[in-house]
Image (spheres, rainbow, N blue to C red):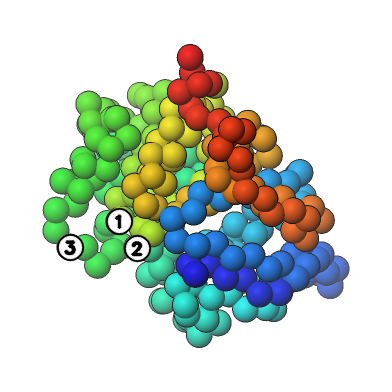
Amino acid sequence: MLIDLKDIVKDYDNGGIITHVLKGVNLSIDEGEFVAIMGPSGSGKSTLMHTIGFLDRPTSGEYFFDGQNTKDFDDDDLAHIRNERIGFVFQSFNLLPRTTVIDNVMLPLLYSNIKTGHRHKAKVALEAVGLGDRIDFMSNQISGGQKQRVAIARALVCNPKVLFADEPTGNLDSKSGSTVMSILEQLNKEGRTVILVTHDMNVALHAHRIVTIKDGEIISDKKVDAKDRIHSKIISD
């Protein structure tokens, strides 16, 4: 079991006003799965992803990652995991402006234990998402779809076990979104665990399993039937 959440609670304290966002979530994800987390705005789906992705700590409950109880991890342990064992792709791309594509992709390597070959590794990651011919372009010289592919390359450059994608097609047109989903599908086929957060069922149906959350609780957890699964090539035809 790669990810195992047991009774996870997440509360936020805003000046003494407590907001209960996650309410005893139990969720297990095996290595190599492609899981979509769905829910309406305010359901807790992004908070759940942030908790699984070590961007936030739960208020209570236990989280086991790759067999280890994460309550024993200090800040340095968490920083190491975020940098080298998981990757993030966000809706807003989060690229550095006025910086080349390849420099954006190399950024995680500067904080890793990988000390050599940064440019080569970044180039390989960009080629994997079809952008080998854009490595020296500035980040403001490429389209939105290409920016998201750069973000995927950046997430992959340290060869993480898990890739988190938070509304990765939210700022893209349908063709660019289809390309991004095709890349995520391929990465999963190659053995990488992909966890996708979305409000869009057409996007969620690229996954093999859909977890639905509402008001901080998981209300369904279903496998996607092969006949219902959407493949990017169908959308783009």
Upstream in the sequence, badge 2 or badge 3?
Answer: 2
Q: CA distance from mark 1 to mark 3?
A: 11 Å
Q: Which mark is residue 158?
A: 1
Upstream in the sequence, badge 1 or badge 3?
Answer: 3
- Are the two marked residues, 2 and 1, in contact with CB atoms closer than 8 angstroms? yes
Q: CA distance from mark 2 to mark 3?
A: 13 Å
Q: Of residues 147 and 26, which is closer to you in this image?
A: 26
- Label 1 sits on a secondary structure element that is loop
- Are the two marked residues, 1 and 3, in contact with CB atoms closer than 8 angstroms? no
Left or right of 84 on screen, residue 64 = right
- Image quarter of residue 66: bottom left
Q: What amino acid type is highlighted by mark number 2?
A: Glu
Q: Residue at x 52, y 81 (%)?
A: 69
Q: Residues within 10 Å of mark 3 (few under 14, many from 20)?
A: few
Q: Which mark is residue 84?
A: 2
Residue 76 appears at what percent x and percent y? 41, 76
- Label 3 sits on a secondary structure element that is loop
Q: Which mark is residue 115?
A: 3
Residue 120 appears at what percent x and percent y? 16, 46
The relative height of residue 66 versus residue 69 in the rendered view (above or below) is above
The relative height of residue 166 versus residue 145 in the rendered view (above or below) is below
Left or right of 58 on screen, residue 43 = right
Q: What amino acid type is highlighted by mark number 1?
A: Cys
Q: What amino acid type is highlighted by mark number 3?
A: Lys
